Amino acid sequence: MARRKIIDSDSCKFSLDVSGDNKKTLDNLTANYMLKYGPMINKIIGTFCRMPDSIKKVIAKACLTEYKKLTVELEKTPDGFHRQPLEQERESYLDILKLINDGIYVVPDEDSADNTMKKVKLADGYLIVPNDWIVVNPERAETCRYAAVLECRNSAKYDIPHFIYLNNYKRGNQYTNDMKEQFYSLCRKIWPRFSEIEELNKKNQPVPDPDNEGYYLNLEAYMNAPIIGLFSIDEQGDNLTGKYPYGAMIVRTANQSEEK
């Protein structure tokens, strides 16, 4: 008796139920490709879920463009029955974007410079951030579980990018002075203008008005200055509103709950 062919050392055999409509589609595919069900399913997964990055980028851009067109149309369509096919079509584009991105896709905010996102592998998951954000210590990626973002108020006015520092502190209130100084030092090294921003930040810290409690002598200057802020990036599911600034989040791919 011939031995059953093994695809690879990690291959698995599944038993699954397929809906009637999907069975008809699968039958047509197996007939036209002249393949059995298993190889056909492997081909579908390999083609759509493991495609080359260059192809993924083209498909993602097209789907995102159509998704946003439908979003604009839905904003102008208040009537329920007219909305339904538009919502279904938009959801289909989102499903495609998820399928080609390991099941996770966050529609980027408009204020992301090029509306594309990138993944940074972490110890037990990955970080999703806008493509133009600068990771200052990428060499630590696979030993870190969390990420801090440095954002300056009035960043657009001063043309200041966002910076990411990978670390093992979940919340911003855990950040140590040493960690902050290391973060700032790397920002200076990568983006020399950061020294100038530090000076403006220091110079324009709020000065309390001794004669009026709760008021500041330099309020206007403070509000217009590039004030530096450090923030932690949420894990997917931690944000109760379901909204993540710029679409930035951490996605876990392993069950690990311990915090440092």
Image (cartoon, rainbow, N blue to C red):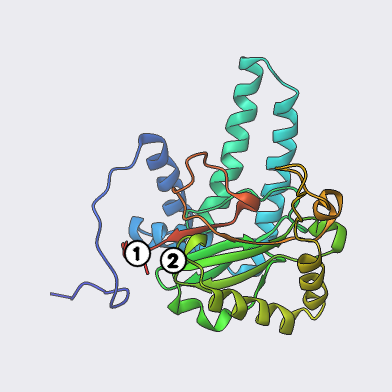
Residue at the limit of the structure toward the front, as seen here: 211
Say which of 253 and 167 sits in front: 167
Q: Residue tagged by mark 1?
A: 254
Q: Is residue 120 visible?
A: yes
The answer to which quarter of the image holds residue 255 is bottom left
In space, the residues marked 2 and 1 are separated at their CA atoms by: 7 Å
Residue at the limit of the structure toward the left, as seen here: 1
Q: Is residue 38 left or right of residue 170?
A: left
Q: Residue tagged by mark 2?
A: 125
Q: Residue at x 82, y 51 (%)?
A: 217
Q: Is residue 51 visible?
A: no
Looking at the image, residue 226 lies above or below residue 143? above
Q: Residue at x 70, y 60 (%)?
A: 58
Residue 78 x %, y %: 69, 17
Q: Is residue 77 left or right of residue 225?
A: left
Say which of 69 and 221 sits in front: 221
Q: Is residue 219 left or right of residue 56?
A: right
Amino acid at dot 2? Gly
Residue 234 x %, y %: 50, 55
The numbered mark at residue 193 is: none
SS for dot 2: strand
Q: Residue at x 51, y 81 (%)?
A: 140
Amino acid at dot 1? Ala
The answer to which quarter of the image holds residue 53 is bottom right
Residue 14 x %, y %: 25, 57
For label 2, the crowd category at 10 Å Cα-Cα, with few meaning under 14, some 14 to 19 and many 20 or more, is many
* Residues at marks 2 and 1 touching, judged by CB atoms closer than 8 Å: yes
